[in-house]
Amino acid sequence: MQLSERVQRVQPSATIAISTLAREMRAAGRDVLSLSAGEPDFDTPKHVRAAAAAAMEAGDTRYTAADGTPELKRAICSKFKRDNGLELEPSQISVGAGAKQVLFNASAALLNPGDEAIILAPYWVSYPDIVKLCDGTPVIVSADIDSGYKVTPEQVESAITGRTRMIFLNTPGNPTGVSYTRAELEALGEVLSAHERVVVVSDDIYEHIYWGDEPWLTPAQLWTSMRDRIITVNGVSKAYAMTGWRIGYAGANADLVGAMRKLCSQTTANPCSISQAAAAAALEGDQSMLEVMHKAFRERYDYLYQAISAMPGMRCARAQGAFYLFVDAREAIRAKGLGDDAELAELILSEAEVALVPGSAFGAEGHLRFSFACGMDDLAEAARRIRRLLA
């Protein structure tokens, strides 16, 4: 079977692959603790599940509009106004089967062969492969632990060429949990404002899991002169513990949304009708769960940061959100006589029975990503096992 060049350009998601391996090992009787998945360990709120059940009983089980029901689009517009001060119309909203599909649709609608997309590393594993699938070329701009995993405006300026079409920004970010401050965003905006062809994709999926020292802002709130070329992407997976419901959305230029709608009509036809009803309930209903989850994730972060920082060969940068700790493990790799982060992750999985994701999957070799989207008991036991292995 001769496969397409397109599909051969990309790799399977490393995070999904490792989470799957951890599940298989547990099924085989191994006592594996998985700190690999980016999935909240909370249940979907009760009123959201009730809304889904009500939609099924009401017969809302048929095709919907390709890129979202009017009801969900209105709820998303209300969310953007309430949380971000953005005035958007339903014609500017695109709903997809998860934020990942929305990101793909935006890229497919914008990129031509030879176009470049700037991706800030460490990056979420899927950004480069989404760009490759859409015939674009990923251009990686890297930051390290000494810079707090934040790129500078000068780095971005140097990366922009006549072929640059997109730049992806994820703050707080996966895998680092790092969030850009208002001043840092303003400085990046000054660079990007001078390049009118460049479209900004702001992936805000961790918006509500943030504990920085100043209010969190999405770029469209600051870069008002550029709003027509900012795609603000979000979803219900992380904030409302709805990963399996698969609903993501974006607010963007109406013409771009129209192009993304065409892609929806020829691929998924529409997101799940029941999930859309549940997502509308999540966005419009009781928001108290956001604070419950925020408090739990902050407590887990504080614990894990201290625990990992005390281990030999491990360095951590402070995070301001999400539910990840990104660890520079290069000293531990050398101390164990290993070749790279993949070998260290394999050693930790085989001997300590803790599943982690190697940093090379995120464009940062010599690192490990710890997810603390699990209970404190599991975190404490995982830390104990890894500490014993490294010592």
Image (cartoon, rainbow, N blue to C red):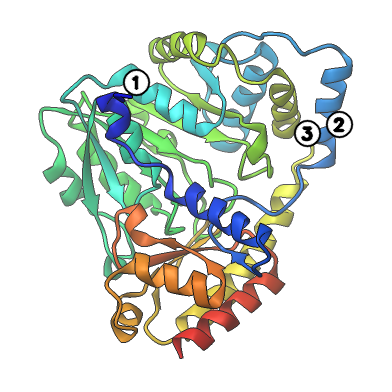
Q: Which residue is mark 2?
A: 50
Establish if 377 lies above or below 360. Answer: below
Establish if 161 lies above or below 264. Answer: below
Quick one: label 2, few (<14), some, or many (20+) residues within 10 Å? some
Q: Are marks 2 and 3 in contact (CB under 8 Å)?
A: no
Q: Secondary structure at mark 1?
A: helix
Residue 307 quadrant: bottom right
Residue 22 quadrant: bottom right
Establish if 48 lies above or below 18. Answer: above
Amino acid type indicated by mark 2? Ala
Quick one: label 3, few (<14), some, or many (20+) residues within 10 Å? few
Left or right of 55? Residue 178 is: left
Amino acid type indicated by mark 1? Ala
Quarter the N terminus occupies: top left
Looking at the image, tell me whether mark 2 or mark 3 is earlier in sequence order.
2
Q: Residue furthest bottom?
A: 391
Q: Secondary structure at mark 3?
A: loop
Left or right of 391? Residue 273 is: right
Looking at the image, tell me whether mark 3 or mark 1 is earlier in sequence order.
1
Q: Which residue is mark 1?
A: 108
Q: In front here: 357 or 193?
A: 357
Q: Which residue is mark 3?
A: 285
